[in-house]
Amino acid sequence: NTRFNGYAYDGDVYNGLYSALKNQATPDPITLNLSGHDKGACRALVSRTRSNQIYSGGSDGRILRWTEKDKVWVSEELVDLSDYLIYTLDVSPDDNWLVAGGATMGDATKNYILLWDLRNMSAGPKKIAGFTQNIEDVVFSAKDKGVYVRDNAGRSIKFTDLTNVKEVLKPAEKINSITMNRDGSRLAGV
């Protein structure tokens, strides 16, 4: 491709390389799918380079922690909920806390987020109420020591200090996604 001045990002070149890696006698680990949410779609994914782990959550109510061992990603089930669909996850900047948001199977006007201490998962989650309808984004803030939450079909952004919940933004238009910069000084939405 390079010798004949082909387009550098030609999809056929990358598809060919992928197929060659996948169809070896022992497929290259980079081509393997991370299968784990077979009872429902994987809806949330968050990775942490410090701990070299990936967390996934799904509409099956499960949260899996993925760890790389010998170039293969291995999953461990952390949570299996029967009454909650997980749509979003985040891990605190210190890698000690995991927060999940989604949809309760109960009254959607009384939704909540769940918070786990990753150092003591057996203690179970802390339920933080005060949200409406589906929760589709949760974002830890290093600066504000809490979590920003997008709920109510993107018509509300709330903040919780992990005890209290308050609405910080009620936009005129729907917000589809939020994110925060690393130092927690800016929250952006689209």
Image (tube, helix red, strand yellow):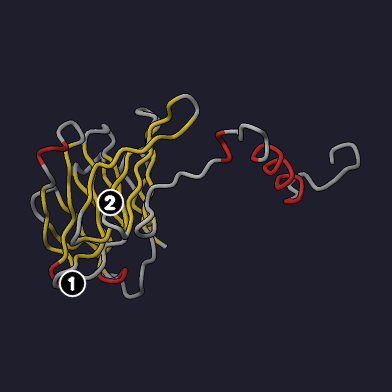
**Quadrant of the image containing the N terminus:** top right
x then y, percent, for residue 85: 26, 61
Count up the numbered dots: 2
Residue located at (28% from left, 51% from top):
62
**Structural crowding at the residue carrying mark 2, measured as other residues with C-alpha within 10 Å and reported as few (<14), some (14–19) or many (≥20):** many
Q: Nearer the viewer, mark 1 or mark 2?
A: 2
Does label 1 or label 2 sit earlier along the sequence? 2
Question: Where does label 2 land, which residue?
Answer: 62
Relative to the observer, which residue lies in front, 98 or 41?
41
Answer left or right for 190 relative to 93: right
Q: Residue at x 36, y 72 (%)?
A: 174
Q: Does residue 49 appear left or right of residue 29 in this picture?
A: left
Location of residue 150 by image quarter? bottom left
Element carrying mark 1: helix
* Residue 174's disc number: none
Tag 2: residue type?
A: Arg
* Depth check, front residue: 84 or 10: 84
The amino acid type, in three-letter code, at marker 1 is Ala
Q: Secondary structure at mark 2?
A: strand
Q: Which residue is mark 1?
A: 108
**Vertical side of 161 occupied by 120: above or below:** above
